[in-house]
Amino acid sequence: MNNHFLKPLLATALAGISGGNPHLMVLVLYLVTVLFTEMITNNAAAVLMFPVALGLAASMGISVVPFAVTIMMAASASFATPVGYQTNLMVMGPGGYKFRDYLTLGLPLTVITCLLSTLLIPLIWKM
């Protein structure tokens, strides 16, 4: 599949899921970005999602800044797995951590970060 085709397709799918509601779009964008961040590196997730955010903002005629901040927060919130950020992997072995330890402590932290981010981003950076 052509990479130029994937990004507009993803932006269209996210816009459809959120029903065109910018606040819900921030939540959906956050969730997809954090999901990618847990599977690939945070930098790769941000690079993958930024063109999608540009497409979403352009299609709605609103500022891309809240979406960019959403991606920055979600890509940095890699708490639920040791894969998303190199420091998580670095401390896993010496600390004796297991994959489930990241899920047990990291998933609630990820949820809290998601809730706070999706509530505050639209208030601080106007859409």
Image: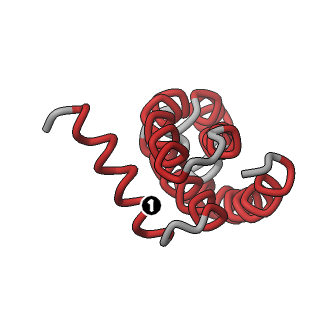
27 or 107, which lies in front? Answer: 27
Q: Nearer the viewer, residue 3 or 115?
A: 3
Say how many tags the image has: 1
Left or right: 16, with 28 as reference point: left
Q: Amino acid at mark 1?
A: Ala
| Residue displayed at 80% across by 60% down | 116
- For label 1, count other residues whose C-alpha is less than 10 Å away and answer few (under 14), some (14-19) or many (20+): many
Instruction: Specify the quadrant of the image occupied by residue 117.
Output: bottom right
- List x then y, in percent, for residue 8: 32, 44
Q: Is residue 113 left or right of residue 94?
A: right
Q: Which quadrant would the N terminus be assigned to in this image?
A: top left
Assign a secondary structure to mark 1. helix
Instruction: Give whichever of 110, 13 is nearer the camera.
Output: 13
Rendered location of residue 56, percent (x, y): 49, 48
Residue to which mark 1 is pinned: 15
Task: Give the x, y percent position of residue 99.
Answer: 52, 52
Residue drawn at the location 50% of the way across and 43% of the way down = 58
- What residue is shown at x 65% (from left), y 48% (from top)? 79
